[in-house]
Amino acid sequence: MKQSRLVSPRDVFAAVGDATRRRVLDLLMRGELPVRQIAAPFAMTRPAISQHLRILLRARLVEVRREGRDRYYRLHAKPLRQIHDWVGHYERFWRGKLTALGKFLDEQAKKET
């Protein structure tokens, strides 16, 4: 099942904003799994997990295929690039702050010796 609409960054951010969905993505990093195996480690119903999977599917973070009565999900990580790029935009800020902190700590250490 493929969706043709484009994914907005908001969809991807909202999808990974939930801890359960992040854990589902972590499980799928190991490979394709049927819903029953995805649901097994969670203390929630299979329909609740299916709802999380629908959100991940809408954000195009997972792909699904049917085999008989089972649905198998696999990770489609490409949309995560949007998050990587957005966070990377702020990396310069943190790098600068950490450099300044390092200089400050070095100066403090020199004063103490």
Image (cartoon, helix red, strand yellow):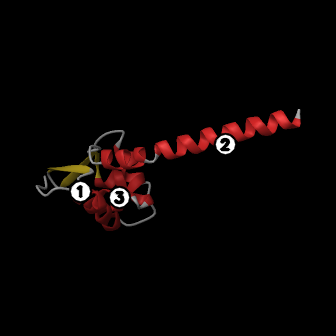
Quarter residue 109 falls in: top right
Whether residue 10 is visible to the viewer of this picture, yes or no, is yes
Separation of residues labelled 3 and 1 (CA atoms) = 13 Å
Q: Residues within 10 Å of mark 2 (few under 14, many from 20)?
A: few
Using the rendered image of the protein, determine whether residue 1 is visible from the camera's viewpoint.
no
Toward the left, the furthest residue is: 4
Disc 1 secondary structure class = helix
Snapshot quadrant of residue 95: top right
Amino acid under disc 2: Leu
Instruction: Please name whichever residue, 31 or 7, is drawn nearer the observer in this view of the structure.
Output: 7
Q: Residue at x 37, y 66 (%)?
A: 45
In the rendered image, which residue does mark 3 sit on?
Answer: 13
Q: Position of residue 99 (x, y in %)?
A: 61, 38
Residue at left offset 36%, top offset 41%: 29
Instruction: Please give the label number shown on residue 57.
Output: 1
Marks 3 and 2 sit apart, C-alpha to C-alpha, by 30 Å
Q: Which residue is mark 2?
A: 101
- From the viewer's perspective, is 76 left or right of 66? right
Front-most of 104 and 60?
104
Above or below — where is 52 with respect to 86?
A: below
**Quarter occupied by the C terminus:** top right
The Cα atoms of the two marked residues, 2 and 1, are separated by 42 Å
